[in-house]
Amino acid sequence: MIGVIKRLWRRISNVGVKKGMYLNDIETVFLNRFIACQTVLLIFYALTKAVLFGWLTAINVIAYVSLSTVTLFLNHYKHYTIARVYQVILMNVYVFISVLQYGGKVGNEYHFLIVSLFGLFFFWKRKIVLFGSIVLSIILFFISIDYTASHSAWISLSDSEISDTRNAVDMMSFFVLWIMIYNIIAIWIDFQTSILRKNEMIEEKSDALNSGINYAKHIQHSLFPRIELVEDYFSNSFHYFRPKEKLSGDFPFFYKDEDEDTVWVAAADCTGHGIPGALISVLGINVLHRALTEKSIKSPEKVLDWASDEIEQSFNRFSNHNIQDGMDISIAKIKKDKDDFIVDWAGANNPLWIVPKDIDYLDCSSDAYSCVDHAGIKLIELRGNRRPVGRFVRSKHFTKQRIRLKKGDRMFMFSDGYTDQFGGDKNKKFSKKRFRYLLTSMQNESLSNFGDELYEFIASWSKGVEQVDDILVIGIEL
């Protein structure tokens, strides 16, 4: 029997409540529970009145209980606001008729206060409706007081009957308030329990997700070149790598050719950051390695041509989706030639910056590159093709640029994360112009110090502004 009552209670409580949406429907659950409790209480109250004073005195109670079931139907059909407004109006009308019924001699006009508390609970998010419900209770209160002062009660009772009725009304008021408080506390406990349960589930899923992301980070970083390997060829070098999230769409690339005097260096920026960017970066690293090992491609522009076709085919080989993700990249093939270095370079949207130790041997009037002078230090910029590696609307081949450099010359490759970072007094992008000046101003220092200084400078620039993208800067001294 108890089990049947519990199931019935649960079913009534959840009338109109969507599965899994309990926390969003607390007012609905409260209203359903209140109607269920008041129905039992008022039926007992109506029977008591009928026995003591006749069925005529119980008609308004029975009518109120019957009309209250309409609220459950409105909740069932998802008319939540109408159900609450209807119930508050119905309660006001019931109290008003009760006051007129007994001529204000039993004190039930103060039940308007209880009704106004209902309005406060149901409409605290809707200020206008809340104001209207309180105003309605106040108006009916004063109308009932004024009416009972000039009119006789609808039902004539003796002093003893008035006393008994007043006691019954007081007991009724006590139980109504008790039901309200009990349901509010019960629902609050359920609410807190549900929150704790959901928080535990979120923490478990978050821990599992973080564990997976951390392991994915470990896998991604294992594909990056080891610092020791790079330092074997370029003792004075650095790479500043700062992902926006744990996983990155930017990646450094280093490959030693079979020819001991030839190495490949690249800085790539894949579409997006975080998990999507990391997925593309794994594909990008794999494609670059295959281009140099399986395909034995010897020129950087042909590496980018083949990588572009391969990435496009990889995305669309087994799918009809037109995926246009890819990567921007700056890639250089560096070959030692006696005391000089021959650099074959190609770029997809990203440039190559060179700070020569001695500018005299380079022709700054060449159309192949541009020169910028800052505080007596010149910076040469080689510009790449204005297209990414991957699917592109205006498909065309990449081009190669060759430049002969000397020992002590410095090369810089980077993604757009550093230059696009917002900050400063006017919250603007750092920009390539400022980045050029920053790098040239640091040329009297060892490259090994660049990583820390770049970090400190961008941290000061951003001033707490959220990092907008992955950051990768690579610098090597020939």
Image (tube, grey):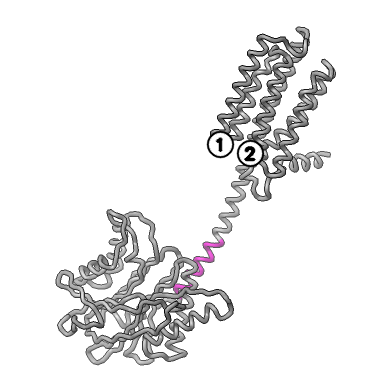
Q: Which quarter shows the N terminus?
A: top right
Q: Name the residue under label 2.
A: 81
The x, y position of residue 360, in whole percent, is 15, 82
Would residue 417 be seen by someone viewing this image from the given angle? Answer: yes
Q: Categorize mark 2 by other alpha carbons within 10 Å: few (<14), some (14-19), many (20+).
A: some
Could you say which is closer to the camera, residue 334 or residue 142? 142
Q: In this view, does 267 lie above or below 128?
A: below
Q: Mark 1 points at which residue?
A: 126
| Residue at the (21%, 70%) spot, across then down | 440
Tell me the amino acid under the disc marked 2. Thr
Would residue 284 be seen by someone viewing this image from the given angle? Answer: no
The x, y position of residue 58, in whole percent, is 80, 21
Can you name the residue that lies furthest to the top here? Answer: 159
Describe the element under mark 2 as helix, strand or loop: helix
Which stretch is magenta? 208-222
> Is residue 217 within the magenta segment?
yes
**How many callouts does the rendering have?**
2
Q: Which mark is residue 93?
A: none
